[in-house]
Amino acid sequence: MSKAIRDELKQEVAKRRTFAIISHPDAGKTTLTEKLLLYGGAIHIAGSVKARKAARHATSDWMEIEKQRGISVTSSVMQFQYAGKNVNILDTPGHQDFSEDTYRTLTAADSAVMLIDVAKGVEAQTIKLFQVCRKRGIPIFTFINKLDREGQNPFELLEEIERVLGIRSVPMNWPIGMGRELCGVYDRMKKQVELFQGNDHSTIEVRPAADYNDPAIREMAGDYLADQLAQDLELLDVAGDPFDYEKVRAGELTPVFFGSAVNNFGVQTFLENFLQLAPAPTSRRTTDGEVEPDDEKFSGYIFKIQANMNPAHRDRIAFLRICSGKFERGMSVKHVRAGKDIKLSQPQQFLAQDRDIVDTAYPGDIIGLFDPGIFRIGDSLAQGANLTFDELPTFSPEIFAKVSVKNALKQKQYLKGLDQLTEEGMVQVFRSIGPFEDTYLGVVGQLQFDVFEYRMKNEYGVDIQLARTQFQFARWIVADKLDASKFRINSTLVKDKNDNNVALFENEYAMRTAVERMPDVKFLETAP
């Protein structure tokens, strides 16, 4: 590799920041995403997810059902430039029923922003998503949101983060008041005050301060809030964790920022600090060892597939995380699983549903590839090598329903929709073994059924019938010989989309009994 090419790669990699935003539903994640896009110049007006009557919806919520319900149910990818950095935001679904999509998306991120509601603190879904990030060892940055409302004491929130999540924290700024008394935040690193002066982001004022005892703060905030700020920060200076960049990079210390996304308050400070502190793309594990982002040969993997992003064209897009080398439009790469070369001729970059053709891209970037049906989640693409990136996590479904089409004349559209939405990873499909083939869908949460039914009707014109079953557990079967008759009581034997044998069980007792009766059979929680 020539020095010029390696230098170009290193420079481009250093500019990239690819991160996911994680939170419990309703913590304000979509709103924060909108404001980050606003600062990046990607949009000119932020659409509140609450403002349904005004027909102004959040940019990251592009699917019709998301606009109607005011929630994110699919991961979005958005890209913009700010302060010399190329930013890739992965806006994950907050709803717990869509945790599979979220977990897969987190594998494409180099860092995570954890959003916490100032009143509710650390919530259940945040804990689950945090654990995934922690397992991957990626840096986590915390934004404590909704400071314009009454909430918990900031010290109690920091203590809760440590107690519940097991990670130390270092506040980068500190609130001056809260709720109706909110006056501003003091930036501990830059020694300046950000003043809260209304709903319009253009009226937020930043003033320098010698330190937190600066008389200007007392003049702006009044004696009570100035005294409280001084006491809090004196305590933090003595007893709080010092900022340690290496601990942040190792995921052992989380920088904490306070603000209010809906009022655009504290967002710019957060964005600027985050872009300085967050890591550029790093190496990725493969079956052949580590792949460095500045390796000359191109490589990447598919972490998400989305059908019908443009309903008028009935298209299907595979989302590719670039891991090494330079991507160029029209290049040929090896589709490792299929064992053949393919040409990447229509690569796209995203602002949610808006797309532009991209000519070049670099490690850390997320590009969309037109998918005629050749890609699956987890597929690796590489130049001149059979690289396979570490498997994306798969999950055992917990809720099952028999699915059928109401109008037999729509069978073709039904099968197409079932196939495409299964490839997206939205649902898992199983087929019974025997003369009368039943089709079962498996999901983690009920909302996945609701969205599946909605999308089948609106995108494929098919009305379906879903009949919930008693099954609660799925186990993939690995055995030299298998007797299907042993799965007749409180269980059934089915095949997954790859023709693997899977046993569905109604309860834990039935599953335990089967395991005991068949010592030579392996029962796996995920596909082998």
Image (cartoon, rainbow, N blue to C red):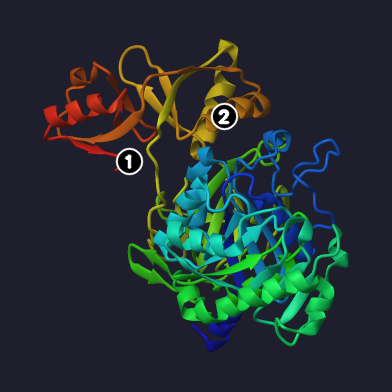
Q: Badge 1: few (under 14), some or many (20 or more) residues near its Cα, within 10 Å? A: some
Viewer-proximal residue, 267 or 13?
Answer: 267
Task: Give the quarter of the image for residue 79.
Answer: bottom right
Q: Work out whether residue 374 can be spotted.
A: no
Task: Give the quarter of the image for residue 432.
Answer: top left
Using residue 182 as the reference point, say whether residue 374 is left or right of it: left
* Amino acid tagged 1: Ala
- Place of residue 473 in the rendered image (x, y in percent of width and height, measured from the top left): 33, 30
Going from N to C along the chain, the mark reached first, 1 or 2, is 2
Q: Which mark is residue 158?
A: none
- Place of residue 274 in the rendered image (x, y in percent of width and height, measured from the top left): 63, 71
Q: Is residue 67 above or below residue 168?
A: above
Q: Work out whether residue 110 can be spotted.
A: yes
Using residue 358 as the reference point, say whether residue 287 is left or right of it: left
Q: Is residue 414 above or below residue 343?
A: above
- Place of residue 190 in the rendered image (x, y in percent of width and height, measured from the top left): 69, 82
Viewer-proximal residue, 343 or 371?
Answer: 371
Residue that appears at 36% across and 23% down: 471
Total marks placed: 2
Q: Is residue 419 above or below residue 372?
A: above
Task: Give the quarter of the image for residue 65.
Answer: top right
Find disc 1 in the rendering and name its residue.
527
Residue at disc 2, secondary structure: helix
* Amino acid tagged 2: Phe
The answer for how far apart the CA atoms under marks 1 and 2 are is: 22 Å
Q: Badge 2: few (under 14), some or many (20 or more) residues near its Cα, within 10 Å? A: some
- Place of residue 122 in the rendered image (x, y in percent of width and height, measured from the top left): 53, 53
Q: Which mark is residue 452?
A: 2
Viewer-proximal residue, 52 or 375?
Answer: 52
Residue at disc 1, secondary structure: loop
